[in-house]
């Protein structure tokens, strides 16, 4: 049981590190947009990096921004839930519901999405897929691969929460506090 | 029986979803998981092919990732988060307090004005409610304001953020129903100001009739000399004015797309935070984390809802909705419109704007294609109707933030208020403001020009 909890926490730390590093893409995206707007205004163009490419780069960064945060957002309990029906339930009942949700909803969704996403990326890789626009960016497998990696991270987060819940529900009393899964909700 | 199940899978899917959403598991997983389960059932009944699941990825790709319009969402979230942590709010509230000190209910009105100004600089609600609660609630209680009025004022002012442009809700709805985001931003300006004006009128009238609810500020508040006064006004109004001109000015002027305006606005917000000395490495990390979590939450619902909407359609959901509406006798445009408004209002008690937008709009979109409102809203075809419709939904969705048991604004306030303010105060406090929001909704329905005048004026609807 200690080992399960340790694995869960190791996943959590790794996901957090990846996510925080990826979070700087907010700043990167800001810089790219400002650069694009200014250079277009003054009619300057970086060689090989015209406005079309910059604009495609913007949504590449956007894709990475949400992909790398899907998993950690689950661990940090930021995803929206409608918990009025079970808010008053005992913590153990809530944990049982959460565990059932992990098995019935989260794992199947992650596995199926990951399976088809891998396919989707590999096709782009094999065909050496290029932007629809002649002046766009090459290597479509990179953003498509980012979504796939994001789904891997999401699966890892689901596993991490699942392990935590196993320890909480069926582990020894002394680990219970350390394994509790709860958090505040962030919201737009 | 078995045949009946096979042909009514879409209906069963919708009913099961409604129940399952309440189990407290993240909505996106519930949507996706149930869609997979019903896809599998569809395979059993031979109305769905396993390979159709492959469509999930192209849809996420085309709808969410490779979508230049939606880049505006993370950028507006980032801009809002940076701004809310940049410290510009405290100065602004202080200045507004001084400016409104002679009016009945001045402090409450300055909170509403501040919510309005902050709404025009950010596209999100959560953090601005927390900020208003932290900054304004102690001040209002210390002045002896009635608790209900205090809470209602702050909650309603905070929710303006999602209606007054820039607004991530309008970006997402525009993307879903194929209306340009610039048009929607222009269309939302007047309804947003109308809502704000309704709040102000209500507060002013209530405070004039019952002064004990809203005691005036002592006259010695604020700067002593005229020069000092103007310096304070300048210092506190410069940052929001700068951002509003930068962001909304560039969109309405046609110089920048909403995405570009959001990026430039983020740069502007970072600059303001730096000016205020709130941009250390640690501050920036905090801003990034908060913005990224909000962003992930929004787009994860897209992931789940994409699969759900796709399976629902594949199982015949579109025809089902149209059939049901016909069966219950909803066929004229007004009947469908009123039905949808009532539905969205009721759903707002339990759901949040993002689920309502991403689940309900795609489900009911087919019914909307059949209606004709030309005699009410004037010529221009479906774009004009959709613009009006989206703004009505947006005004309506404001109530979703305030209606218990699941209003997000309430949830946030509950976490921030001192123990002397109970849930009872909060519930009683928001009732008049929900009624004002419904009044605002009725105004936008009866007078579509409130919505359509500005976008027509700047030439977005010609």
Image (cartoon, coloured by chain):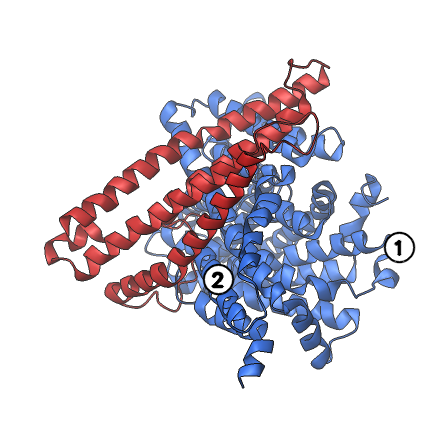
Disc with the residue nearer the chain's start (1 vs 2): 2
Q: Residue furthest front?
A: A126
Q: Which chain is red?
A: A
Q: Secondary structure at mark 1?
A: loop
Q: Which mark is residue A56?
A: none
Cβ atoms at labels 1 and 2 below 8 Å apart = no
Q: Please report, as a chain letter, where disc 2 is located.
A: B
Q: Secondary structure at mark 2?
A: helix
Q: How many marks?
A: 2
Given this view, does label 1 or label 2 mark the residue nearer the observer?
2
Could you tell me which residue is drawn at 64 percent across and 47 percent down?
A: B170
Residue picked out by circle 2: B36
Q: Nearer the viewer, residue B210 or B375?
A: B375
Residue A97 in the image: above or below residue A165: below
Residue A15 in the image: above or below residue B32: above
Packing grade of label 2 (10 A; few <14, some 14-19, many >=20) is many
Q: Colour of chain B?
A: blue
Residue picked out by circle 1: B379
Q: Position of residue B280 (x, y in %)?
A: 39, 23
Residue A66 appears in view? no
Locate the N terminus of chain B and report the quarter of the image it occupies. bottom right
**In whole angstroms, how far apart are the C-alphas of marks 1 and 2?**
43 Å
Q: Position of residue B39 (x, y in %)?
A: 52, 65
Q: Position of residue B380 (x, y in %)?
A: 86, 52
């Amino acid at each position: 049981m200690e080992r399960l909890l340790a694995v869960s926490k190791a996943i959590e730390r790794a996901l957090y590190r990846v996510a925080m590093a990826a979070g700087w893409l907010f700043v990167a995206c800001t810089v790219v947009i400002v650069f694009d707007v200014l250079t277009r205004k003054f009619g300057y163009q970086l060689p090989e990096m015209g406005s079309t490419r910059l604009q495609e780069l913007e949504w590449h960064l956007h894709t990475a921004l949400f992909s790398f945060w899907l998993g950690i957002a689950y661990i940090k309990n930021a995803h929206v839930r409608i918990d009025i029906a079970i808010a008053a339930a005992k913590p153990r009942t809530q944990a049982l519901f959460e565990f059932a949700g992990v098995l019935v909803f989260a794992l199947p969704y992650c596995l199926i999405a990951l399976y088809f996403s891998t396919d989707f990326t590999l096709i782009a890789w094999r065909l050496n897929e290029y932007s629809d626009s002649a002046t766009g960016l090459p290597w479509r497998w990179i953003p498509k691969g980012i979504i796939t990696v994001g789904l891997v991270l999401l699966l890892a987060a689901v596993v991490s929460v699942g392990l935590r819940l196993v320890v909480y529900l069926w582990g020894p009393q002394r680990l219970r506090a350390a394994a509790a899964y709860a958090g505040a909700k962030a919201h737009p | 029986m078995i045949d009946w199940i096979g042909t009514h899978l879409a209906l069963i899917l919708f009913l099961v979803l409604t129940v399952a959403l309440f189990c407290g598991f993240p909505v996106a997983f519930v949507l996706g998981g149930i869609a997979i389960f019903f896809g599998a059932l569809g395979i059993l009944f031979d109305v769905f092919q396993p390979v159709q699941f492959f469509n999930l990825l192209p849809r996420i790709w085309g709808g969410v990732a490779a979508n230049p319009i939606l880049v505006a969402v993370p950028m507006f979230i980032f801009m809002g988060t940076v701004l809310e942590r940049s410290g510009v709010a405290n100065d602004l509230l202080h200045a507004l307090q001084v400016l409104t000190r002679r009016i009945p209910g001045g402090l409450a009105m300055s909170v509403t004005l501040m919510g309005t100004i902050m709404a025009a600089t950010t596209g999100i609600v959560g953090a601005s409610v927390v900020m208003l609660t932290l900054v304004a609630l102690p001040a209002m209680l210390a002045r002896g304001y009635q608790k209900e009025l205090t809470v209602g004022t702050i909650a309603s002012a905070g929710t303006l953020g999602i209606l007054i442009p820039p607004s991530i809700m309008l970006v997402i709805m525009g993307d879903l129903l194929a209306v340009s985001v610039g048009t929607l931003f222009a269309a939302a300006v007047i309804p947003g100001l109308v809502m704000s004006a309704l709040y102000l009128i209500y507060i002013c009238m209530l405070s004039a009739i019952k002064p004990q609810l809203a005691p005036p500020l002592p006259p010695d508040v604020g700067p002593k000399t005229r020069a000092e006064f103007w310096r304070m006004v300048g210092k506190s109004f410069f940052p929001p004015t700068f951002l509003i001109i930068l962001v909304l000015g560039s969109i309405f002027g046609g110089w920048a797309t909403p995405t570009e305006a959001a990026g430039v606005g983020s740069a502007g917000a970072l600059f303001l935070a730096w000016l205020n000395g709130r941009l250390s490495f640690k501050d920036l990390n905090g801003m990034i984390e908060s913005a990224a979590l909000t962003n992930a939450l929004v787009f994860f619902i897209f992931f789940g809802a994409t699969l759900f909407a796709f399976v629902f359609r594949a199982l015949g959901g579109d025809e089902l909705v149209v059939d049901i509406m016909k069966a219950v006798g909803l066929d004229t445009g007004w009947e469908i419109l009123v039905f949808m408004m009532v539905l969205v209002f009721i759903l707002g008690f339990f759901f949040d704007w993002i689920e309502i937008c991403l689940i309900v709009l795609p489900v009911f979109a087919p019914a909307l294609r059949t209606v004709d409102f030309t005699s009410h809203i004037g010529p221009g075809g479906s774009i004009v109707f959709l613009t009006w419709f989206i703004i009505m939904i947006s005004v309506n969705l404001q109530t979703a933030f305030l209606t218990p048991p699941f209003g997000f604004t309430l949830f946030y306030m509950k976490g921030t208020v001192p123990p002397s303010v109970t849930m009872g105060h909060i519930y009683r406090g928001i009732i008049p403001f929900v009624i004002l929001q419904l009044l605002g909704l009725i105004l936008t329905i009866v007078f579509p020009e409130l919505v359509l005048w500005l976008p027509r004026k700047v030439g977005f609807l010609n």
